[in-house]
Image: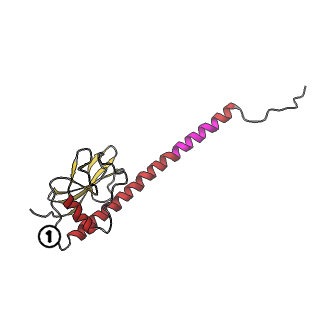
Amino acid sequence: MKNNNPKKGFTLIELLVVIAIISVLSGVVMQSLSSTRAKSRDAVRLQNIESIAKGFQVATTGANGGQFPSSSGYKCLGVTVSTCWAVGYGFDPTVNSVLSSGLSGAIPRDPLFTVAQDGGAYVYNSNDSGGAYLFWRMESTSCGRGIGTLGVPTGSTCKLYLGPPTTP
């Protein structure tokens, strides 16, 4: 007896194989997108650090003999809250005012700005190793500019020397 109605379509095994292949490919694509986003945020951070450094340079040129504002400890930049980072670094209106006077716009914020998270804001300190420094957190293990100060599971904490602080 001849079968006049041959089965058309895919078997269950064939469909499962195709679904598995698509799942693996989508996982690879999602991982590469995540990595690309992190690299993009790090590029923005480096651009922001460059802007902040230039802002301080412009603000201090001709004022205080080119020395940077003095701070007592680590101070958050571009935020108006009392603390930033999980360790509770403070806010200093004088430091932020000096920086604002050297920038043509607002003080840049970290792309993943979160007040209570380490690396959630850029930080200034003029009492670190005899000079004024900027601190920030990168998602990669390279600082790109400045030097790495602390390797962390999520990347690197970096610092950049700006110049001598104002002597009190």
Measured from the top left, where is residue 70 in percent x and y?
15, 60
Q: Secondary structure at mark 1?
A: helix
Q: Residue furthest top?
A: 1
**In the picture, residue 1 is in which quadrant?**
top right
Q: Is residue 32 above or below residue 69?
A: above
Measured from the top left, where is residue 2 in percent x and y?
89, 28
Q: Horizontally, is 35 left or right of 58 in the view?
A: right
Observer-nearest of 131 and 120? 120
Measured from the top left, where is residue 4 in percent x and y?
88, 31
Instruction: Please name the residue shown 14% across and 70% down the image.
Output: 64
Q: List the residue tagged with mark 1.
A: 64
Residue 37 is inside the magenta segment: no
Q: Is residue 70 above or below residue 20?
A: below
The amino acid marked with disc number 1 is Asn
Residue 21 is inside the magenta segment: yes
Badge 1: how crowded within 10 Å, few (<14), some, or many (20+)?
few
Q: Which residues are magenta?
A: 17-28
Q: Residue furthest left?
A: 168
Instruction: Please name the residue shown 33% across and 43% down the image.
Output: 153
**In the picture, residue 42 is in which quadrant?**
bottom left
Specify how the rendered protein is coloured.
secondary structure
Q: Residue furthest right?
A: 1
Instruction: Please name the residue shown 60% across and 40% down the image.
Output: 21
Instruction: Please name the residue shown 14% across and 59% down the image.
Output: 130
